[in-house]
Image (tube, grey):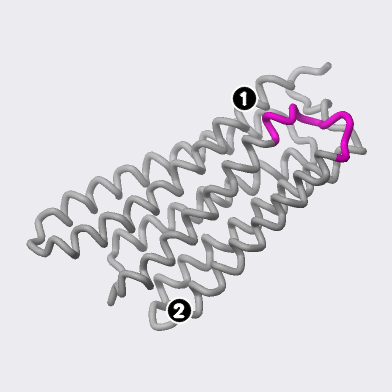
Amino acid sequence: MAKGSLSWIRSNDKAIIDVLAEQAQNVVKATSTLLELITKYEKVTEYNSKISNMEHEGDEIAHKLFNIIDQTFVTPIDREDISKLTSAIDEILDSTQGAADRLVLFKIKKPTEYMLELAKVLLSASQEVYESMTHLRSWKSSKDLIGHCQNISKYEHQGDTIYRNAIAELFETNDPVEIIKFKEIYETLEGALDQCADVADVIEDIALKYT
């Protein structure tokens, strides 16, 4: 097996890789819509509904993937790795939808600049997740996969910095209800970035295991 070549992917395994890419693409759609929600906040309910639909679509994609795996005797990646990967991607989507939901449920009048910054970083990280899936599909070298993982880690660290600054400023306020509401939204956004990092960890394990 040539070093750096994902030769473990065979043509009859294309369906599994395609569905993983479809799942990741749906996450990018959701994180992009979350950013639109924050920048066009007068349509918050409309955008939240769109993200909710994408979350349901994500569940259907994950279900489709597991059906394919059940019907496949030999999978391109260990079943455990596929399960970890699809679950981690799904959790990004769940947190994205959770952040949008909280903005509506908590009746937030106006999102903060920190929320905008976190949403931008989350979109960038989710795009890297999608690119890594397309590299699986197109048989790129493991160096490409590791590069995307490193970019995801960079965005996750950026998100940590934004989150810490947001929390520090939040605790300078005197409204305990506002602190609780905003802190939970910040945590949900930061959690979505952590889940992007979880995807990167799985991808790195796969790249090292099979190349």
Q: Residue at x 49, y 38 (%)?
A: 197
Q: Is residue 81 magenta?
A: yes
Q: Are marks 1 and 2 in contact (CB under 8 Å)?
A: no
Where is residue 25? Give x, y as percent: 66, 56
For the residue pair 82 and 105, the one nearer the viewer reads as 105
Q: Amino acid at mark 2?
A: Thr
Q: Is residue 88 magenta?
A: no
> Could you tell me how far apart the alpha carbons at marks 1 and 2 are, in whole angstroms?
39 Å
Q: Residue at x 13, y 53 (%)?
A: 171
Q: Quadrant of the C terminus?
A: top right
Q: Amino acid at mark 1?
A: Asp
Residue marked by disc 2:
45
Q: Which mark is residue 87?
A: none
- Label 2 crowd bin: few (<14), some (14–19), many (20+), radius 10 Å: some
Magenta stretch prevailing secondary structure: loop
Where is residue 168? Give x, y as percent: 17, 49
* Mark 2: secondary structure: helix
* Chain part drawn in magenta: 71-82
Q: Quadrant of residue 180?
A: bottom left
**Disc nearest the viewer among 1 and 2:** 2
Where is residue 126? Give x, y as percent: 55, 50
Residue marked by disc 1:
205
Q: Residue at x 24, y 53 (%)?
A: 166
- Comes first in the chain, label 1 or label 2: 2
Left/right of residue 157 with respect to residue 82 in the rendered view: left
Question: On screen, 97 above or below 205?
Answer: below
Q: Quadrant of the N terminus?
A: top right
* Mark 1: secondary structure: helix
